[in-house]
């Protein structure tokens, strides 16, 4: 086998050196089709080898804790990719022969093979191996026309085609199996990146997905004509808003005896003069503007240090707009007060019109409700926030936006 693979590798290397620009359109399409089939056929060979290696216990014998860990180091794969490779090898190994044959001939992709093998396992458990073989044959034919997602949906009713007499009972079993698969595959990965950023990836089960969409979707719509964020940026900010709301509830588990909260540490001189960055209690650095904005939030605990590092002040709840004062603010503003924004009060933080770092008091006359997006916008732009003669919040646009700088108000929320 290894000799054939060496020759195949040489042939692929020769193809890689060929100039794609010299091919006709028809030959380009044929090349894409051929490389796709070859990739699937090679995957079948690799899966068989992985399964045999796992069965022999080679990885453990060589000092690895598992075959997945061995593959991770050997092939420089991610943890999830290595585990999927081992799991798929085991799945294909116990599947009806038609699954392996279809993959080996390039008739199905690796992900299609996973779907067919999963479906075959459910069908076999509910209707027997003979019916499972028939189901594999039908699914392989469908795989020529449908991607893995559609193929999995259609597979939930495969017994309607191959064994209608047991279809209803098997459909219930298929739903249970699908729920179990989703529960097994659920995960969230949080990876640290440069600059204090985090990368999120993962798979949610159906219930968690519904919960996430229920809270993120309505918060991800543009907040007004001034909202120039991309859809991805709006979803990012919506997730941050959900986290702020969770912190404000005060119902999260304690950490080390303290209520769950964010602590921002900075110097007094640097904060008031906007000269220095701040530091989160988890070690990440923040820009001065960000520190000043976070100081408005009831979920943030500002810790201000003097020149020698001594603690000058640690923000306490009475400094923040909460309790009766927040309720009065909600009654006055009705939601985010920025012109054109429809965000409700629960998604808003109380912004100090005159920053408390500049001596601004915590009072109803010095506060305004702002959603996460407009809170950042006000701190980072030249908009001026003030209260009108009637005590209602109004926003003066920068001169480049409105040379006359006429104050604007939010007319979406009912005023009381």
Image: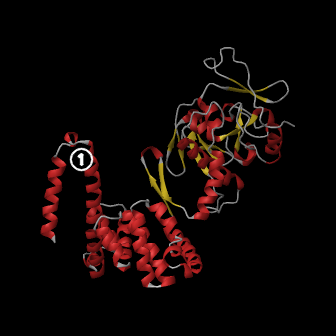
Residue 172 point in image, percent of width and height = 59, 77
Relative placement, left or right, of 61 versus 255 is left
From the viewer's perspective, is 15 left or right of 278? left
23 w.r.t. 387: above or below? below
Task: Give the residue drawn at x 85%, y 27%.
Answer: 390
Q: Is residue 404 visible?
A: yes
* Depicted 21 relative to depicted 108: above or below: above
Task: Tell which of 248 and 276 is nearer to you.
Answer: 248
Going by the image, does 284 lie left or right of 259?
Answer: left
**x 27%, y 65%: residue:** 41
Using the image as rendered, state which of residue 31 and residue 191 is in the foreground: 31
Q: Residue furthest right?
A: 416
Image-quadrant location for residue 268: top right
* Secondary structure type for disc 1: helix
Report the residue marked by disc 1: 27
Quadrant position of residue 137:
bottom left
Residue at position x 60%, y 50% from top?
262
């Amino acid at each position: 086998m290894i000799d054939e693979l060496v020759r195949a590798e040489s042939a692929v290397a020769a193809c890689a050196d060929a100039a794609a620009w010299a091919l006709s359109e028809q030959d380009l399409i044929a090349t894409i089709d051929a490389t796709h089939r070859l990739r699937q056929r090679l995957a079948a060979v690799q899966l068989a080898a992985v399964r045999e290696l796992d069965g022999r216990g080679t990885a453990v014998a060589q000092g690895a804790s598992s075959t997945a860990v061995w593959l991770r180091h050997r092939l420089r794969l991610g943890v999830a990719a290595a585990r999927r490779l081992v799991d798929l090898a085991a799945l294909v190994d116990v599947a009806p022969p038609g699954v392996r044959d279809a993959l080996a001939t390039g008739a199905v992709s690796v992900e299609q093979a996973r779907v067919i093998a999963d479906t075959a396992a459910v069908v076999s458990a509910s209707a027997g191996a003979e019916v499972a073989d028939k189901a594999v044959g039908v699914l392989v034919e469908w795989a020529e026309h449908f991607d893995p997602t559609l193929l999995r949906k259609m597979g939930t009713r495969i017994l309607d085609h191959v064994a209608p007499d047991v279809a209803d009972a098997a459909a219930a079993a298929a739903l249970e199996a699908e729920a179990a698969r989703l529960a097994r595959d659920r995960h969230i990965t949080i990876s640290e990146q440069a600059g204090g950023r985090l990368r999120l990836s993962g798979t949610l089960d159906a219930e968690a997905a519904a919960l996430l969409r229920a809270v993120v979707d309505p918060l991800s719509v543009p907040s007004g004509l001034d909202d120039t964020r991309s859809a991805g940026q709006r979803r990012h900010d919506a997730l941050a808003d959900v986290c702020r709301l969770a912190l404000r509830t005060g119902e999260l588990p304690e950490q080390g005896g303290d209520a769950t909260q964010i602590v921002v540490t900075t110097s007094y001189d640097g904060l008031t003069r906007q000269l220095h960055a701040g530091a989160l209690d988890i070690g990440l650095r923040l820009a001065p503007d960000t520190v000043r904005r976070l100081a408005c939030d009831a979920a943030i605990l500002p810790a201000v240090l003097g020149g020698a590092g001594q603690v000058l002040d640690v923000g306490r709840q009475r400094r923040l707009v909460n309790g009766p004062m927040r309720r009065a603010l909600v009654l006055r503003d009705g939601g985010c007060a920025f012109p054109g924004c429809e965000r409700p009060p629960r998604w808003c933080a109380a912004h100090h019109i005159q920053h408390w770092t500049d001596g601004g008091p915590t009072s109803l006359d010095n506060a305004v409700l702002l959603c996460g997006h407009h809170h950042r916008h006000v701190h980072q732009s030249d908009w001026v926030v003030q209260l009108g003669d009637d005590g209602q919040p109004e926003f003066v646009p920068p001169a480049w936006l409105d040379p006359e700088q006429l104050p604007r108000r939010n007319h979406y929320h009912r005023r009381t």
